[in-house]
Amino acid sequence: MNKSSHSQIKNSIKQAPIRLTEENYLDLAKKIIKGNKKNITTTQLRNILQYLSLLDNKLLTTSDSKKDILIKKELTYFKLRLVYAAGRDYKVKSFITDSNLIKYVQTAQTSFKEFKLYHHYLEALVAYHKFYVQ
């Protein structure tokens, strides 16, 4: 293995997101915010969170049999909104990339439990941003 291929493997491992779990989402959010305090405003973060909060409220009145279908549909659109926000501002793109919001959305689409974990992760990002920036 030459030096170049070793470097490529090392970079791809570094870029792979850590799996989001109940045990680590707070630590991940804290780490992301500490490294990206100036890349996104509280308002931008809260606008991202707002969509998920509205979906969470909608899910409260949705039957269990229809929740997974609604989550998949709504998170597909949410992913589009993240891509659009990232395209509008390079600092927001940096934040979305560093926090793996788009990559984690794919897992969040698989079940109600994963959606709730993703929602909590976003809430933690907002909370730590408010704490460290203000």
Image (cartoon, helix red, strand yellow):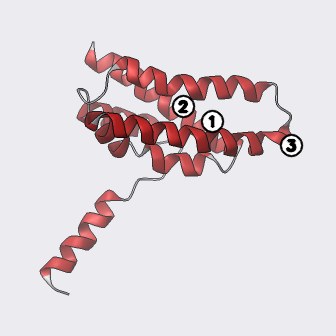
User: Mark 3 vs mark 1: which is more N-terminal?
Assistant: 3
Q: Is residue 129 visible?
A: yes
- Which amino acid type corresponds to the residue marked 1 in the rendered image? Lys
The image position of residue 47, as x and y in percent, is 47, 22
For the point 62% across and 44% down, the residue is: 114
The image position of residue 95, as x and y in percent, is 32, 37
Q: Is residue 62 left or right of residue 18?
A: right
Tag 3 and tag 2, C-beta contact below 8 Å: no
The quarter of the image holding the N terminus is bottom left
For the point 54% across and 22% down, the residue is: 50
Kindly report the distance in space between the C-alpha atoms of the residues bearing marks 3 and 2.
23 Å
The residue beneath circle 3 is: 65
Q: Which mark is residue 116?
A: 1
Please name whichever residue, 99 or 102, is drawn nearer the observer in this view of the structure. Answer: 102
Disc 2 crowd, CA 10 A, few/some/many (<14, 14-19, 20+): some
Kindly report the distance in space between the C-alpha atoms of the residues bearing marks 1 and 2.
6 Å
- Which amino acid type corresponds to the residue marked 2 in the rendered image? His
Badge 1 element = helix
User: Mark 3 vs mark 2: which is more N-terminal?
Assistant: 3
Disc 1 crowd, CA 10 A, few/some/many (<14, 14-19, 20+): some
Circle nearer the viewer, 3 or 2: 3
Tag 3 and tag 1, C-beta contact below 8 Å: no
The residue beneath circle 2 is: 120
The quarter of the picture where residue 84 lies is top left
The quarter of the image holding the C terminus is top left
Tag 1 and tag 2, C-beta contact below 8 Å: yes
Badge 2 element = helix
Kindly report the distance in space between the C-alpha atoms of the residues bearing marks 3 and 1.
17 Å
The quarter of the picture where residue 40 lies is top left
Disc 3 crowd, CA 10 A, few/some/many (<14, 14-19, 20+): few
